[in-house]
Image: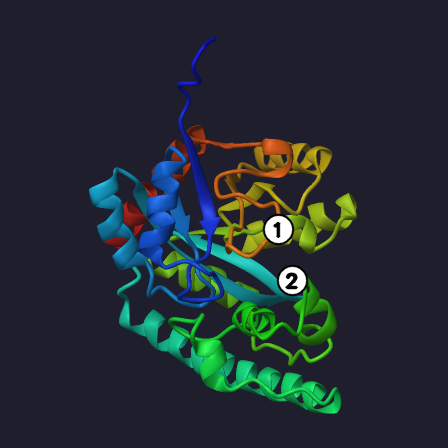
Amino acid sequence: MNRDTRQYIDLHMHSDCSDGVFSPAELVDRAARRGLTAIAIADHDSVSGISPAQIAGTGMGVEVIAAVELSVQFGPWQDVHLLGYGIDYTDGSFLGRLNGFRRKREQRNVEILDRVNERLTHERRTGLELGDVLVYARDAIGRPHIARALLDKGYVASVEDAFQRYLIPCNVPKSYWLIHDAIAEIRRIGGAAVLAHPTTVSTDRGVLRQAIRELVDMGLDGIEAFNNLALPDEMEFLRRLAGELELLVTGGSDFHGIEEGLEMGKGRGGMRFSADLLAPLKKRLAERRDQLLSL
């Protein structure tokens, strides 16, 4: 039997520095054991996991790309996700803005916890203490951490059950970056801006094509064509559209560690993300660094 000598990567996963389950070092260890050569930990509005992941990656032979995922508003669409790759995650101004969003996120999640506890009280159940949730969190609590606390108490059968019965009904609206501002900020700190799981914007291909064209005019660098929220024919459409618009193509699992049946480094139907996606991304990042140095 021929041995698969191809190299694979995963450019979209989350650590416990945002809403994932595993620490950055644990993610690197899991990636190494799965034979991945490169990963990107793209936490929501947080870059705290990048440095420890890169340190762990050096020792385990896994390249860790600096990344972040920003929640943005784009026209009529809210909670569109924008990935920033190769960013200068030490930039003071950027860190200040992230801290502002973090404070808003922390307040939002406390409000969600209060609403969940109101529902639990109505059901004559003991509410969750903040400490029950913090057991599962690192940088800040998120909804998946509340879900795990509900599961630990025996109030739900699964994380998905927790979302359906408590977290979705008790949701509190997020605060968002404006899309043009988020793209400009990622580019300012040397990164490449990539639209995550594009079909969450729209599954209407005409609408999605026009939306992505508008984002290209704002400076979008690429689209996450290969992802777990798109069907195979949708991923092929996105790949072709990226070629037409001269956009980078990336791929990632969006692994948090809580999704049933979802594995790090894999997409729908066992699809894997080829390391061939890395070279164009690195070329774009090198060009961006040269542009910034010439200013």
Among the 4 quarters of the image, the one containing residue 81: bottom right
Q: Residue 275 appears at what percent x and percent y?
A: 42, 31
Give neighbour class at mark 1: few <14, some 14-19, many 20+ (Cα, 10 Å). few
The residue wearing badge 2 is 158
Please report the residue visible at 32 percent of the width from the left and 46 percent of the height from the top.
64
Q: Is residue 66 left or right of 230 when viewed as pictured?
A: left
The residue wearing badge 1 is 260
- Residue 16 visible in rendering: yes
**In front: 214, or 253?**
253
Contact flag, marks 1 and 2 (Cβ < 8 Å): yes
Q: Residue 45 appears at what percent x and percent y?
A: 44, 68
Please report the residue visible at 53 percent of the width from the left and 45 percent of the height from the top.
253
Q: Is residue 122 left or right of 135 when viewed as pictured?
A: right
Q: Residue 258 appears at what percent x and percent y?
A: 55, 57
Task: Report the disc number at residue 218.
Answer: none
Q: Is residue 59 left or right of 10 when viewed as pictured?
A: left
